[in-house]
Amino acid sequence: MKKQDIAAYLFLAFAWGLSFLVLLHVVDAFGWVGAVTLRSLVAGGTLLAFAGLSRRALHFGPRRWPFVIVGATTVAGQLIGLSYATPRIGTAMAAILVAAIPLFSMVIAHLWKLERMRAQGLLGLVTGTIGIVLLVGFPAVPITPDFLLGCAASLFSAFCAAFGSNYASHRLRGTGSLEVTIGAFLSGGIMTLPLLLAVPVPGLPSWTDVGALLVLACIMSALTYVTYFRLVASIGATRTISVEFAVTVVAVLVGAVVLDEPIAFVQIAGAAVIIAGCALVLGLVPFGRKPKLTPVP
């Protein structure tokens, strides 16, 4: 990895790790649907305004459908899952389950015949699955239907992130990261907008609430996603997604130190098992030969 790639990687780790804390505030103020919709539209609008003020020409290409798919998965699906799950299972638990994203990414890449899964990848998948069972089956809080639903929403979020990243990497190859981010956020925001009729904003937000929304949308969404898609184009979707390991560490520390969230020893063990599984899937641990990439059909 180049120096700028490493810098981008570290920026994503800290920004997304801290975003769980800001997300809790925004969801409390705007509701879980409002948090996703307003976050997406503000992020997309901010980048669109930036492009206009800087007189940067945007080239989206002739096809719009790929942007819709990326918006539906990487933005709408992922953010809805996170916004719904985090208040119910806590930032630490949500962040730990987010570490399953690379596992989903490897499975999707294999099914799409983008990467050939070998013994190391299969071992990683089994290891990661055991880690998720440890986390969900032995939490530091009582197991309730609401808790299990939150865990399911978090895993759904992880799947959407993995799907959208692989899709963007191969179907929007050659498209600028700014264009991909704008198209994805505006598409995702428009898709979730009708859901506000079912889950409206609970009350009149304060200026502090608006400030938290702007930080979440402009810095922890717009800027990070431009960086993310640029990194995907530079080092590939699977390697970029491995940043979720570091995100998990930052978010768990924030949850434990700032929010005083309980973390059981078995959860720490489960997190370690998930990270070990993901490391195997990504080839970060020496284990035979590295998988060969096959050309995209």
Image (cartoon, rainbow, N blue to C red):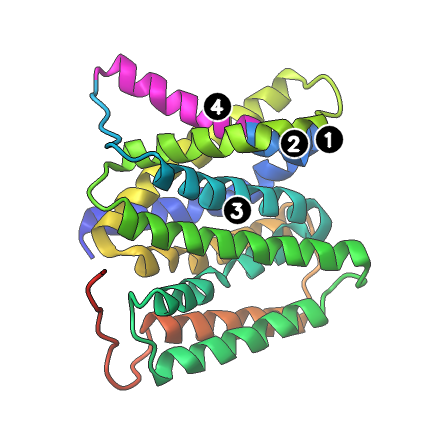
Q: Nearer the viewer, residue 64 or 25?
A: 64
Prevailing SS of the magenta stretch = helix
Q: Which residues are magenta?
A: 38-55
Which residue lies at the image location 62% right of the left edge and 16% below the top edge? 207
Question: How far apart in space, not on screen, are marks 2 and 4 (Cα)?
Answer: 17 Å
- Mark 2 or mark 3, whichever is nearer to me: 2
In this picture, residue 178 sits left or right of residue 33 = left
Residue that numbered label 3 is attached to: 78
Residue that numbered label 1 is attached to: 198
The disc labelled 1 sits on which kind of residue? Ala
In this picture, residue 89 sits left or right of residue 246 = right
Q: Quadrant of residue 286?
A: bottom left
In this picture, residue 140 sits left or right of residue 285 = right
Can the viewer see residue 232 in this picture?
Answer: no
Of the numbered discs in the image, which one, if any, rests on residue 195? 2
Q: Disc 1 vs disc 2: Cβ atoms closer than 8 Å?
A: yes
Element at label 1: loop
Badge 2 or badge 3: first in the primary sequence: 3
Question: How far apart in space, not on screen, are marks 2 and 3 (Cα)?
Answer: 15 Å
